[in-house]
Image (cartoon, rainbow, N blue to C red):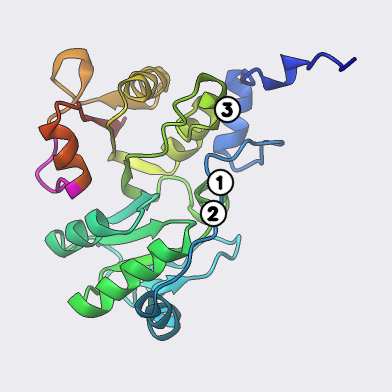
Amino acid sequence: MTDKKDHASDAPRLYTRPDLEKIAAGEHYLNRIKSFVLRTGRLTPGQANAIEKLGPQFLLPYTGQAIDWDASFQSSSSNRPRILEIGFGMGETTAKIAQTRTADDFLAIEVHEPGVGALLKVIGEENITNLRLMRHDAVEVVQNMIPESFLDGVHVYFPDPWHKKRHNKRRLIQPEFVALLASRIKLGGYWHLATDWQDYAEQMMAVLSAEPSLENTGNLPGGYAEKPAYRPTTKFENRGLRLGHGVWDLVFQKK
């Protein structure tokens, strides 16, 4: 006879407003369920070479201390907008945005090594100078290395939807993380998200709309936004659009 599984531990944790304020202030929340599974992927020779040759300049270490942004970007001006991207995959979109918005500096976070290597390779080939990478858990980076009211913008594009209901608690966009990241955005700064999973789009909309420091700027039905011109469509996204799949953009502003 087998024991019945106790599912109570699987229920999502509910956070009070004081909990969220502590999180936003930088206090760790315990027993956090991570939004990613660290898969081992084989590096191509080109990716491995890019990490070896370009990593020292463009791949920043996780230190757990407040980032020295100007030193990291070797910038002579501290007035350049600071944009954080979380989860860049293979980096196609990230590279194109950085090339389009040359007046901005971008820090892009990804845990999977082949993606880091692929984007470093593009950085070298295209001579992209306003982009730095970090390979670490984005929640820990935001919590420990990004000061409050520091970022001018945040990009989160097509995060893992964890579409099975029992896995929804693994999704990145949860109230506690939204409170944390919102505290790192300057007044007037923005948070741009995109997903091709409708259920996740609805959750994003609900969670960000409930965060009192954020204001929705979307004017489409349901509160969604037109795709900003700076976000290119990927080959995968274009294929989905041709098949009739939806894509939802959300743009919120810090108030």
Mark 2 surroundings within 10 Å by alpha-carbon count, few (fewer than 14), some (14 through 19), many (20 or more)? few
Provide the major secondary structure of the magenta segment.
loop
Q: Give the CA separation, mark 3 to mark 2.
A: 30 Å
SS under mark 1? loop
Question: Which amino acid does the dot numbered 2 rest on?
Answer: Arg
The quarter of the image holding the C terminus is top left
Q: Nearer the viewer, mark 3 or mark 2?
A: 2
Q: Does residue 129 sit above or below 206 in this rendering? A: below
Res 189 → quadrant: top left
Depth check: give the residue in front, 222 or 212: 222
| Residue type, mark 1 in image | Val
Task: Give how far apart the Cα atoms at labels 1 and 3 are.
Answer: 25 Å
The disc at residue 130 is none
Which of pointers 1 and 3 lies earlier in the amino acid sequence? 3
Q: Residue furthest right?
A: 1
The residue wearing badge 2 is 39
At x 59%, y 40%, the residue is 34
Which mark is nearer the camera, 1 or 3? Answer: 1
| Disc 3 target residue | 20
Which residue is drawn at the image coordinates 34% and 18% (left, top)? 202
Q: Which mark is residue 37?
A: 1
Q: Which residues are magenta?
A: 227-235
* Position above or below: 201 against 107: above
* Element type where label 2 sits in the image: loop
Whether the magenta-drawn stretch holds residue 228 is answered as: yes
Amino acid type at mark 3: Leu
**Left or right, 101 with reference to 179:** left
